Image (spheres, helix red, strand yellow):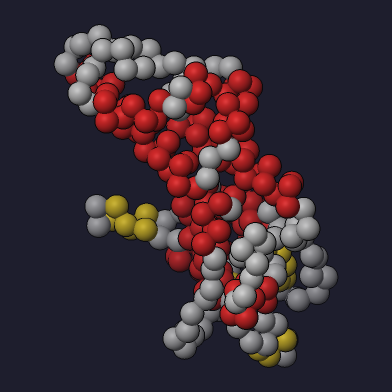
Amino acid sequence: MIKQTSPGYILTARTLQQSRIWFKEPLHLKCFFWLVLNTNHTDIERNGYLYKRGELVTTYTEIIKAMVFYHNKKPIFPSMKQVRNILTWLASEGMIEVYPLRKLRQGLGRTRADTTAHTGAYIGIKIVVVNYDTYQTPENYKGRHPGRDFFELGHNNKNEQEKDNNALLVASFENFYSAYPKHKDRKKAFTAWKKLNPSGGLIETILKAIQSQKAEKEALKDQREFVPEWSYAATWLNGRRWEDEVEQKEAADGWL
């Protein structure tokens, strides 16, 4: 359904690195950008129907093909379930709206995400990128007050800054906690994370340190040396143990 478009561009803001989608699995971001890249940048009439700027008519099959990636030269395609889950999440975040297009084009039920009906009942799906005009208009990026946040992605909650910030904090914590090996005393871990309130750059540093320290421990196991236990996540955060990474490569004992 998607036709080749002429060369052009899309806009995004640097605050993307603090958005919730940044901390999801990479296919979420790839899928959303593919939708934005292929949505109508002007109103288009097709087959007697008007599709407005920011709207896209596609199929699950087309999205699956667009999400392909290669591993050892082998193409890896996401499953139908993965694509539906991604669209469900994007819709729940208020970034898109999904309209199933039935064969008879009658009774087009508006839904946040079509995740239950069998795709054979449809001729396609219409996806609306929420607030497309807001972050795809160059003028909106000019002369903005330094302290004023700009929601580059399609959210409906622009007036709920505090709520959005809390959601970002929870999302970044979930990303940290899933990466940290020891899952005990979650409540204290979140309190320590909230107190730290890390930004995008620090979050990346912390996650890299965890991976590096995991590798160090595996190396010690291979050498049959004593491997100290991981501390509680709250203790690790409060002690700023991600900063120990360089020192840990020099001394194996007592580094956690």
Q: Quadrant of residue 193?
A: top right
The answer to whether 249 appears left or right of 214 in the picture is left
Placement of the N terminus among the 4 image quadrants: bottom right
Q: Is any atom of residue 118 visible in this view?
A: no
Q: Residue at x 56, y 33 (%)?
A: 196
Residue 231 position, x and y percent, is 44, 16
Q: Quadrant of residue 189?
A: top right
The answer to whether 78 appears left or right of 166 in the picture is left
Q: Residue at x 62, y 45 (%)?
A: 168
Q: Residue at x 76, y 76 (%)?
A: 105
Q: Is any atom of residue 237 visible in this view?
A: yes
13 over 200 or under it: above or below: below
Residue 6 position, x and y percent, is 47, 88
Q: Residue at x 28, y 55 (%)?
A: 74
Residue 149 position, x and y percent, is 65, 60
Residue 67 position, x and y percent, is 45, 61
Specify the farthest residue to the right: 107
Q: Quadrant of residue 155?
A: bottom right
Of residues 146 and 139, which is closer to you in this image? Answer: 146
